[in-house]
Amino acid sequence: MKTKSRLLLLSFAAILLFLCAPILPGCMDSGGFGSAAGPSVGAAAPDFTMTSLDGSSITLSDHQGRVVLLNFWASWCPPCRSEMPSMEKLHKTLGGDDFVIIAISIDGGNTNEVQDFITDNGYTFHTLHDQRQDVAKNYGIEAIPTTFIIDKNGTIVEISRGSEDWSSKKRLAQLRELMAE
C-alpha cells in the first residue's frame, strides 16, 4: 500500500511540475505573440509610438539620452506581478532626466482593466497597453516578463527573461553606471 501511495504522489508531483513549468521562469501566452526574430544585445532598440494609460504619446526614440528599462508584462502573470513593486521602487529611486521605465502590458483585455491594475497597485512609471501585441511581436517576446535595458544611445545592452528584483544593489549599480556614461 505504501508503494502505491508513493507512486500516486510522485505521479501527481510530475503532472503538477509539467503544468507549472512554463510559469517558473516567466509566463507564456498560448496566443503565440512572439517569435525568435526579435532584436539582440548590441542592436538598436526598435522604435515605437504608443499611447500611455494616462493618454500621453510615448515614442521610444524620444528617450534617447536616457537609460530605458523596457518591460513586457501582463496582469495575469504571477512573475510579472511579483517584480512590479521593485520596478516602482527603482522608478522612485532613479526616475528622472537620465532614467525611465516603460512597462508594456500585453494583456488582451480592456485597457480599463490594465489601468485598474496599475492604479490599484499605485504604480507610477509609464505604462502602455499593447492589446494586439504589435510591439511585443516586433521585440520577439516569447515569454513574460521580458525586460530590455537600453542605453542612452538606444542600443540594447541586456535582455532579461523572468522576474527580477530591479531595486537590488547590483541592478542599481549597473543602471547608475549606464546613466553615467
Image (cartoon, rainbow, N blue to C red):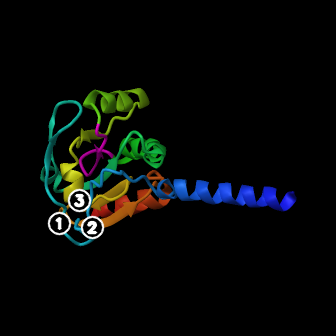
Q: Residues within 10 Å of mark 1 (few under 14, many from 20)?
A: some
Q: Residues within 10 Å of mark 3 (few under 14, many from 20)?
A: many
Query: Label 1 amino acid?
Result: Ala
Q: Residues within 10 Å of mark 2 (few under 14, many from 20)?
A: few
> Would you identify the image quadrant in which residue 178 lies?
bottom left
- 49 to the left or right of 131: left
Residue drawn where x is 22% and y is 56% of the image: 137
Let me know if residue 16 appears in the view. Answer: yes
x, y percentage for residue 161? Answer: 40, 60
Identify residue for label 1: 44
Query: Label 3 amino acid?
Result: Tyr
Q: How many dots with numbers?
A: 3
Q: Secondary structure at mark 1?
A: loop
Residue 139, disc: 3
Q: What residue span does the magenta drawing correspond to?
A: 95-108
- For residue 154, above or below residue 129: below
Seen from the viewer's position, the closer of residues 103 and 95 is 103
Let me know if residue 179 appears in the view. Answer: no
Query: Label 2 amino acid?
Result: Ala
Between the C-alphas of marks 2 and 3, the distance is 9 Å
